[in-house]
Image (cartoon, rainbow, N blue to C red):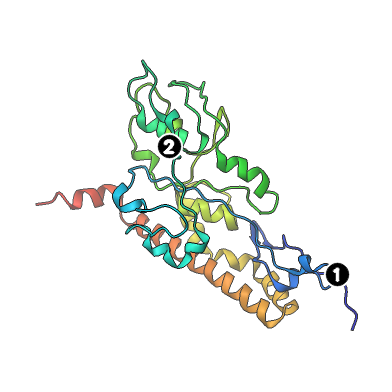
Amino acid sequence: MIITRKAIPRRTFLRGLNVALALPLLDAMVPAIGKAAELVAKPAARFTAIYIPNGVAIDKWLPKTVGSDFQFSPTLEALTPFRNQVVMLSGLNQFEGRGLPGEGGGDHARASTTFLTGAHPTQTEGADLHAGISMDQIAARELGKHTELASLELSLDKVETLGACETGYSCAYMNTLAWRSPTQPVPMVNQPRAVFENLFGDSGSTDAKERLAQIRRNQSILDFANGEVKSLLKQLGSSDSSKVNEYLDAIRDVERRIQRAEEQAAAAALDDVLNAGTEV
């Protein structure tokens, strides 16, 4: 048997039309021979920041003691099995989010902007925004060298229903947490379909009706890459084949749930839902 260093590249894709699926790390992606460190699977590092705009019940959140033997609070006790992987930090108050003399309101705009930048935002309702580079984007510059997408900015806020922003502050300060530069906020994505297509493919249209029509025409976005999937599986061992099939099944499940939600949304207008609770 001849052993070579040939292996499937870590950034292997399944491509089909406008679909591009990145594969999980497989055994076949590890070189056949080489240094021991090279043979160990090294998953890409990840950084996640989660913003809770309405805050938490502090007495139920903070541990009562400090040090390595601290006890988790009621809110965080679900993390107990992972305590050797958890570090609780305190003293991270963002004082730059407090208003300066003469600024008046704007607590929400300053809080969301300061959260990851540590910078006090310039008060303006115009385009002359100024804050700071957010820590997630600093991390993305390095971690993005090893991943297909440098970063994802996700939101549960429905921007269309936010109404007027705080007096004296541009809506951009409230509608994002991420800043690529002190003057360049990164838009947040709040549509599951848009997130899915960022990761796995693009319909080629932003029109809601066209998106729904395409969903109905195609059983799955994975069908576009079906031929390459079958070809790849023939090259893999049983362990890798199982891993790829589980990965693709998970993608299908996510897509199925998004399709079901979109079809339900198309069948019932928002006004009908709102008015249903006011009928007598």
- Say if 166 sits above or below 66 in the image: above
Query: Callout 1, which amino acid?
Result: Arg
Q: Quadrant of the N terminus?
A: bottom right
The answer to whether residue 57 is visible is no
Q: CA distance from mark 1 to mark 2?
A: 50 Å
Residue at left offset 37%, top offset 62%: 77
Query: Callout 2, which amino acid?
Result: Asn
Question: Mark 1 = which residue?
Answer: 5
Q: Which mark is residue 174?
A: none
Marks 1 and 2, the one that precedes in the sequence = 1
The secondary structure type at the circle numbered 1 is loop
Q: Residues within 10 Å of mark 2 (few under 14, many from 20)?
A: few
Asked whether 83 or 220 is in front, the reply is: 83
- Say if 128 sits above or below 219 in the image: above
Residue at left offset 37%, top offset 39%: 160
Question: Mark 2 = which residue?
Answer: 93
- Say if 109 sits above or below 135 in the image: above
Locate residue 27: give its quadrant: bottom right
Q: Residues within 10 Å of mark 1 (few under 14, many from 20)?
A: few
121 relative position to 10: left or right: left
Q: Residue furthest left?
A: 280
Asked whether 229 or 151 is in front, the reply is: 151
69 relative position to 21: left or right: left
**Percent coordinates x, y for residue 88 in the rendering:** 46, 52
Residue at left offset 88%, top offset 73%: 4
**Percent coordinates x, y for residue 260 in the rendering:** 41, 63
